[in-house]
Amino acid sequence: MNANLHQARKFCESVLEHAERYNLNVSVVAVDKGGHLIAMYRTDHAIFASAEAARRKAVAASALAMPTSSMVDMFRNDPLVTTALSASGDMLVVPGGFPMIVDGNCVGGYGIAGGHYSEDEMLGGRALAALAGRDYEPA
């Protein structure tokens, strides 16, 4: 199964709905497994740099098939790995990136940036929970 525009739109629109509710200005990006852009949305007042940060978080989540917050936890005792991944120019290991999972397989990634990384993470978690029809439970 491949990443698709319909799924990307649903996630991005859900993030923007939650961002409006919390009065946050963010960009949200969806990429396919190769890191190619599928969709990019932003609130009206999101800062310019948030789009690129969101893209890099999405690429990292897709490449490693895990949330970027999990990468931070995993590499906490080995900051060299986090630095090396983030230095690639295509990945950013900061909370706010999520793998796009279809039928149990990672087919792409989502990234949110513009708020504090904890807010970016919360927006993504809320969007994923809403799309799955369940309550949001922070990690």
Image (cartoon, rainbow, N blue to C red):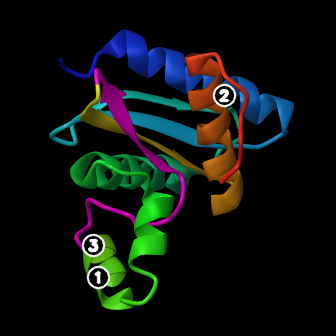
Characterize the magenta stretch by its predominant secondary structure.
loop
Residue type, label 2 = Leu
Closer to the eye: label 2 or 3: 3
The numbered disc on residue 85 is 3
Question: Mark 2 or mark 3: which comes first in sequence?
Answer: 2
Q: Which residue is mark 2?
A: 16
Q: CA distance from mark 3 to mark 1?
A: 6 Å
The numbered disc on residue 25 is none
Marks 1 and 2 in Cβ contact (< 8 Å): no
Q: Which quadrant does the C terminus fall into? A: bottom right
From the top left corner, tell me how far across and down residue 38 is, in percent: 31, 26
Residue at 22% in and 42% down: 35
Task: Specify start and end residues of the magenta stretch as a single range.
Answer: 88-103
Q: Is residue 11 left or right of residue 64?
A: right
Residue at 47% in and 16% down: 9
The numbered disc on residue 81 is 1
Vertical relation: 60 (above or below) 45? below
SS for callout 3: helix
